[in-house]
Image: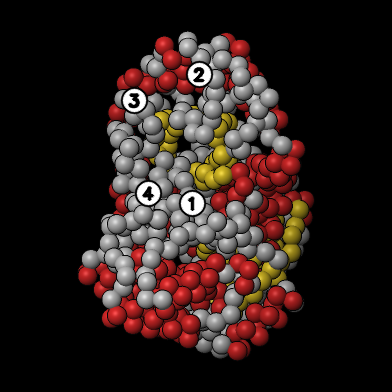
Amino acid sequence: MICQKILLISLLFFPVIPSLSFAGSDEWKEMRLKNEVIIIKSAESKITGGHPFARQDETTYILVAANLGKIGEIAVADIQKYLPLASGCEIEVLKENQASSRKQGFTILLATTKSLTLLNQTGLVCPEDLDEQGCVIKPVNKFPDGTEGVALIGGSGRGLLNGVYTLLEKSANIWWEPVRFLNPEYPMYSNISETILAHCDELRWPGDELIWEPVIRERIIYLGYRFATKESVDWASRNRLSHYVIATPHTLPMSEKEENLLKPVVKYAQERGIKVLFMNMTHRLPADAPAIPASSDEAVSASTELYLDQFKRFGLDGMTWHIASESIHVNMDEAYYKRPRIEWEAKYFNSYYQAIRKANKDAILGVLMGWVYMNPAEELAKLFPEDIIAWVVPNTPIIDAALTDLDSYNQYFNNLWYWLYVSVSKDGAFPMIKLDYLEKYFRKAIKQGNNLAPQGVLGNNNENAMYYVQTARDGLIPNKIFLQSFGERYYGDPRMGEALIAYQEALKYHRHWYNNIHTRDTDNYLTWEERDLLRKVYGISLDVAREAKTLLIQNRLKSLTITVVRCLIRGIPSPASPMQTEEFTEMINGIKSVFSGHYFGEEHDFIWNELLEMENIVNQDQVQPLHKKG
């Protein structure tokens, strides 16, 4: 533990890439580069087949097509960052006109289907109908200059980046994990990204030519404007998501400060080929004109101009609206009440639709349906154009009121996005798992050719988030198989797969959005069987934490273990019995004996503060519901 702390401190102050040599397969290293923590483990075994493209102490040349522009810079920057860490190779970047220069080593060629000059020079061909999100990953035995390596040819710039990250993932086992909450009292995500990769003295592309295309075409990250950061864009890009949807402030037009924060993020995402949309509420009027009667043409016109200006000002790819108009107050005059609310929502939306389509005929426009009004798809199809995105809330245990029929929406609208809660409760600071729930909707989306646009992807539900991105791009993974692989990767020990499966089963009936084990008024107490499962999770997690290979992994286990104890305390009627009080005290003491220090700093260690609060309550022998802070 002392050696780990010294290593971390040295890397914080001296963010230099160390010489990476591994004495054994169990040795892991941890380092920071700016706002990123990188865990470097030794590869379990060297790939014997396939095609080499990077080797310890040898040079890999990155040959960049002239037409790539910013996308080429982004691709090169990430290869330069991760490839030396994964192989110990050296990197040299070549321009297109340097393609024939004689050199030793390996080559990674970066191009798109429009990079005709470079493709002709190198004699490479690719499918003419390659999708814009797709990429051909083509091993090359001999480039014109005599080197071997791999060529990446994207259907577009976005497709090329998808190929770059697929190459890194499959050859170096690189995973970009979700950004976690550090302090829920402060409404921002951490600016620390978490990456894991496997180091091997030679990297190979493990197979023949691959045409990579996502299983689900539109894979969306949806988040509030306060959480729209460049770090979240990087995570979305590297995990090959396609759309970035930002819920705007309720007061519009935005303040100058809000606009200045969002504009760079929108540009940053679009530079990476990710489509950016704003999520708004229909009926919204400018903040300086709230008294206009909602039934008037003046109100519709003012609302339309508000959104059209936003669309143009930010250079968006599209916009979508929430027909429930939550927390939006308008002047509902006498004429307004003479017609159903949904008709007014449609009137406003169709005005937005016409104005924005006139400005950009290819704009992506959508409506969140099935939230409050629960209108049948057949009725909504009479009010809204069929070529929009119908963003549908499925029939879920998380939102009981949303009783929609996905199949009927499929009949009337060309494009469906599924709205699913990847997070679990209002009290989102504690890790929960619900892959068993998500799996059936992911399967349905794949089968029907629909798309996924969940809420709560970033936060502390890392298992749920990574299950979403992996299934959406690669195909359905049975939830228990995923938890086994995720537990081993994320927590560094195969025993954690068994623990996560037990954790999911224990909380299966305790993760309702408004009344679960982490909300204020829960009365759905744990059964004996569920408590035994949680005790199992606690025991395994604590054992793994004692042997954690890095401080970051131990911090992840700290969060899970404290949450398990919190669930147990909240899951019984209060006050606790003497036997329960003794058990809780032993568990808390066990955690305190293993977890010391504050990885991200004491001011961000919300989860540790929860442990101290639990300890105080248990010591008073009065186990009361623990409230979310803030």
Left or right, residue 410 beside residue 389: left
321 or 238, nearer to the observer: 321
Quarter of the image where one finds residue 276 = top right
Residue 196 visible here? no
Residue displayed at 38% across by 37% down: 393
Return the residue at label 3. Answer: 375
Of badges 4 and 2, nearer the viewer stands: 2
Tell me if label 2 and label 3 are in contact, CB under 8 Å.
Answer: no
Q: Residue at x 37, y 21 (%)?
A: 380
Q: Position of residue 145 (x, y in %)?
A: 69, 60
Residue that label 4 marks: 514
Q: Report the residue at 43% width, 63% height from top.
A: 626
**Marks 3 and 4: which is nearer the front?**
4
Observer able to see residue 330 = yes
Q: Earlier in the sequence, mark 3 or mark 1?
A: 3
Q: Residues within 10 Å of mark 1 (few under 14, many from 20)?
A: many
Secondary structure at badge 4 equals loop
N-terminal of the two: label 4 or label 2?
Answer: 2
Q: Label 2, label 3: how many angstroms apart (C-alpha)?
A: 21 Å
Give 401 or 289, whichever is nearer the viewer: 289
Q: Which residue is mark 2?
A: 332
Task: Return the x and y of residue 470 as percentages of the image width and height.
Answer: 44, 55
Q: Are the two marked residues, 4 and 2, in contact with CB atoms closer than 8 angstroms?
A: no
Q: How is the image coloured?
A: secondary structure
Q: Measure how far apart labels 4 and 1 are at the Cα level.
A: 18 Å
Tell which of 293 and 396 is nearer to you: 293
> Label for residue 457?
1
